[in-house]
Amino acid sequence: MSEPPPHEPPATTRPQGPQDDPRPREHARDDETRTDDHPETGGPATRGASARPAVARGLEFTARWALRLLIIGIALWALLRIIGGGWSIVLPLILAVLLSAVLWPLAKLLRRVLPRALAAILSVLALIGAVVGIFWVLIPSVADQGQDLVASASLGLEKIQAWVTGPPLNLGENQIGAYVDRGLQELQTNAQAIALSVAGGLGTIGASVGSGVITFLLVLVLTFFCLSDGDRLLPWSRRWLDPKTHLHVSALGGRVWKVLQGYILSQAAVALCDAVFIGIGLAILGVPFALPLAVIIFFSSFIPIVGAVASGTLAVLVALITLGWGQALIALGIVLLVQQLEGNVLQPILVGRTLSLHPAVVISAVTVGGTSFGIIGAFLAVPVVAIVTAILRYVRHVQHPDEPENPGAVDKDERKRRREQKRAEKEAHRRPEAQPAADPA
């Protein structure tokens, strides 16, 4: 019989101290200074030894981002300097791309029966014919109504003078005459300076007209090449790029072209609605130059928000000078009504769905572009912001393929689907239930 194993007493344990910790002493020292959760905020309650590293980490994080932002700012400044140096060719190229986006449907249609070059030439000639036709119609209208406008303006000034001399201002004809005499004296005193300024302005205008003609001809030539060979650019770039880079460049090129074409066509539709409705209202009121004002409203509406306000103000001023306060207020009501229709119906449906940009972003872009680069900057601000937004969305989509590239469009489609589903459910509830067939027995 085997003997049972001797009973071993349990091993006595004793608390371990820092000297028994198998880890190096610096790790044990870190445990001693480790922070605990704060009982109120839930965050780390920093003790004396750990306060300094936290501040150092914050400063290091801030310094890294400050350096990155500084590098990005310098790169953007250098890019703007390069663009400014080559602006004489950059501006015609941008305008040619925008015109190509407008003429591309016509050129694509003509390509079905004509060669590429001939289709592009006919598209450009159609554009020139449209511009010449607009001026051909406007010039006789302006010439016929010019005398009426001068007479109406004289009557309007007399009404303003009568209003100024009456209550509540009560200036009196003598005071008005004194102000007029003072103005004439100032003109006579500064006549030489004014003449020199006018001469310099005429020289500047002449140079600007010459530069404008050259830019216009260059835009037409570049538009022809864009319509003729623009769709060959991305396949041609395959020779110079590796397959992965060419894939991304092709995807970005398609998205940028889609954004430009959608913006130009949708903004043209909005501008046409503004011009037609406001022009009809002005014609019904009998405002002179209703057709030229409608054309000005059409072209100025390509500058979002700001252009419509400026052209509408011009129409109201013409109505005030020629017809008086009553018709001017009615014209103001027509302009405001059409602009509300544009801002609440047409812009969200057409431009908003194409670009998915918040109105605050649009206003900020137009303001910055107009302040920095004038009318051209205000006109190009929204397309540039839309292109940058499309590029950033694509980059994020590449990094996160599971997320939608345009969450705004997805949300709109989802809301539309839910509305249609609710409408179908309501129709199903309203529909009378089918009665069971009667038992013949």
Image (cartoon, rainbow, N blue to C red):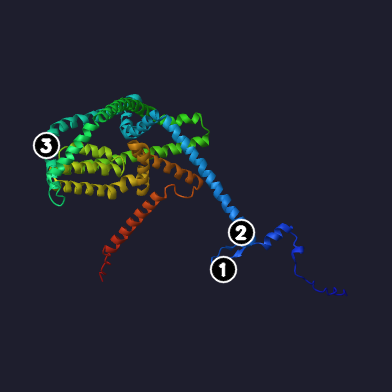
The residue lying at 27 percent from left, 63 percent from top is 430
The location of residue 438, given as percent across then percent down, is: 25, 68
Q: Which residue type does callout 2 highlight?
A: Ala
Q: Which residue is mark 2?
A: 51
Q: Is residue 193 visible?
A: yes
Q: Residue 26 or 97: which is nearer the viewer? A: 26
Per the image, label 1 sits on a secondary structure element best described as loop
Helix, strand or loop at mark 3: helix
Identify whether 436 is placed above or below 196: below
Amino acid carrying label 1: it is Pro
Q: In what quadrant of the picture does the C terminus appear?
A: bottom left
Lower sequence index among marks 3 and 1: 1
Question: Disc 3 vs disc 1: Cβ atoms closer than 8 Å?
Answer: no
Reading the image, the residue beneath label 1 is: 39
**194 left or right of 400 in image:** left
Would residue 63 appear left or right of 146 to someone viewing this image? Answer: right
Which residue is at 36% across, 52% downward?
412
Task: Tell me if label 3 and label 2 are in contact, CB under 8 Å.
Answer: no
Q: Are marks 1 and 2 in contact (CB under 8 Å)?
A: no
Left or right? Give the position of 311 relative to 147. Answer: right
Percent across and percent down for residue 275 are 22, 41
In depth, the one of 256 and 17 nearer the eye is: 17
* Lower position in the chain sequence, tag 1 or tag 2: 1
Q: Quadrant of the N terminus?
A: bottom right
Residue sitting at 62 percent across and 63 percent down?
A: 47
Residue picked out by circle 3: 151
- Mark 2, Cα crowd under 10 Å, few <14 / some 14-19 / many 20+, is few
Task: Between label 3 and label 1, give the one nearer the viewer.
Answer: 3
